[in-house]
Image: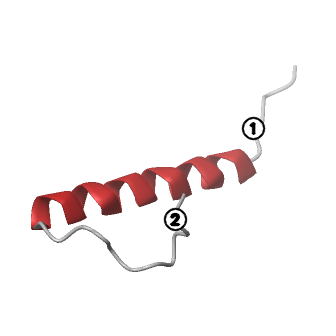
Amino acid sequence: MKLLGQRLMARDFDRQVAEVQVRVAILNGYTALGIPVTKAMG
């Protein structure tokens, strides 16, 4: 797996867009893991 900081490897613009979307989805997954879930008690 490529590091998220590396350059875009795809030459075609549409593939570059897809590559960026995959990276964003990975980062959003890591962010979601760090957000605490709160529940109302009572």
Residue type indicated by callout 1: Val
Dot 2: what SS? loop
Q: In percent of the image, x 55 and y 69: which residue is there?
A: 3
Confirm or deny contact between disc 1 and disc 2 (CB under 8 A): no
Q: Would residue 13 appear left or right of 4 to someone viewing this image?
A: left
Q: Would residue 23 appear left or right of 19 to someone viewing this image?
A: right
Seen from this angle, which residue lies furthest right? 42
The numbered mark at residue 37 is: 1
The numbered mark at residue 2 is: 2
Vertical placement of residue 38 versus 23, above or below = above
Q: Quadrant of residue 27?
A: bottom right
The CA span between labels 1 and 2 is: 30 Å
Vertical placement of residue 20 versus 5, above or below = above
The numbered mark at residue 24 is: none
Q: In percent of the image, x 12 and y 66: which residue is there?
A: 12
Q: Would residue 36 appear left or right of 1 to someone viewing this image?
A: right
Lower position in the chain sequence, tag 1 or tag 2: 2
Residue 35: image x %, image y %?
71, 50
Seen from this angle, which residue lies furthest top? 42
- Image quadrant in which the C terminus is located: top right
Q: Quadrant of residue 7?
A: bottom left
Q: Quadrant of residue 14?
A: bottom left
Q: Nearer the viewer, residue 40 or 18?
A: 18
Residue 19: image x %, image y %?
31, 59
Residue type indicated by callout 2: Lys
Residue 13: image x %, image y %?
12, 67
